[in-house]
Amino acid sequence: MIRPTAAALAAIMLTACAQTAMHAPAAVSPAASAATPSNVAQAFPQAPLPYATDALEPVIDKATMEIHFGRHHKAYHDALNNFAAANPELARLTLQDILAKVSLRPAVVRNNAGGIWNHAFFWQTMAPAGQRGAPSPALLSRINADFGSLENLQKQFNQAGTGRFGSGWAWLIVKDGKLLVSSTPNQDNPLMDVAEVRGTPILGNDVWEHAYYLKYQNRRADYLAAWWQVVNWNEVNKRFAAAL
Ligand code: MN
C-alpha cells in the first residue's frame, strides 16, 4: 500500500482548507485541538461566571461567590483537565457523555466531571435581581400536579437539602414527563448512570458547606430557604420545556 508523505498530506489539507474558505486555519475545533498534548489542558475550559460575584447579594455574599467559583469550581476543572491530559480519549467526549457512563470511570472523573457540570448548571439557574422571572404557566401547572403547590415543592426540596448528610446536592428533575425532587452525595448528579434517581435536572442547589458557610455557618436550612430568592426561573422554564 502506498502511503502519502507528510508533505503531500499537508498539501492536500491546505488545498481542502482553501476550498472551504469558511474554515480558516485558526478555527481549530476543541475536538481537534484535544488531539495535541499541549492543548489537552484546555479540554474542559471553565466558562465565565454569568454575572458579577456580588450580583446575588445579600443571599449569596461576594466572598463566597469568589471562592466558590474561583477556587472550588476551578479546582474541578483543573483536576479533570489534568486527568484528560494523561488520558486523551476522555478529552474527545462531551461532559454529558462522560456523566451518562461515569460508572466506567475512576473516582477522579466522577467527582470532577460532576463538579464541573453541577457548578456550571448552578450558576446558570441563579440570576441577579430583575432577571429572575417566575415559573411559567406550564411549569407551574406541572408543579401543582406533582407537588400540590410551589410551596410544597420548596418544602420537599429544602428537606432533600437538609437531609443530605455531609456534602451533596438537592435537585428538581424531570423524569418521564413528571417532576421529582431528589438528592445526590458529593458531586454526583441525576445525569449519572450511578445516580439512585436518574432524570434531567432543571434546578439544583449546592449543599456543600463551601456554598454557604461564610455567611450562614451551620445554618444550612436558612441558606436553603433564602436561596429561592435568587432562582433564575427564566432558565428553569427553558430547561423544563427542553426536558419534556
Ligand atoms: Mn460547590
Image (spheres, rainbow, N blue to C red):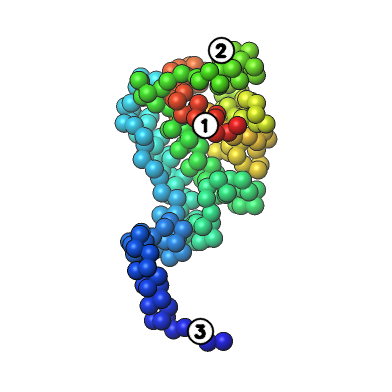
The answer to whether residue 146 is seen in the rendering is yes
Q: Position of residue 12 (x, y in %)?
A: 41, 76
Nearer-N-terminus badge (1/3): 3
| Amino acid type, mark 2 | Glu
Q: Position of residue 143 (x, y in %)?
A: 59, 18
Q: Which mark is residue 3?
A: 3
Q: Along the horizontal axis of the image, is 175 left or right of 208?
A: right
Separation (CA) of disc 2 from disc 3: 68 Å
Q: Position of residue 197 (x, y in %)?
A: 67, 33
Separation (CA) of disc 1 from disc 3: 50 Å
Ligand 1 is within 8 Å of the C-beta of the residue at disc 2:
no
Q: Position of residue 34 (x, y in %)?
A: 45, 60
Q: Along the horizontal axis of the image, is 207 left or right of 142?
A: left
| Amino acid type, mark 1 | Arg
Q: Which mark is residue 239?
A: 1
Q: Quadrant of the N terminus?
A: bottom right
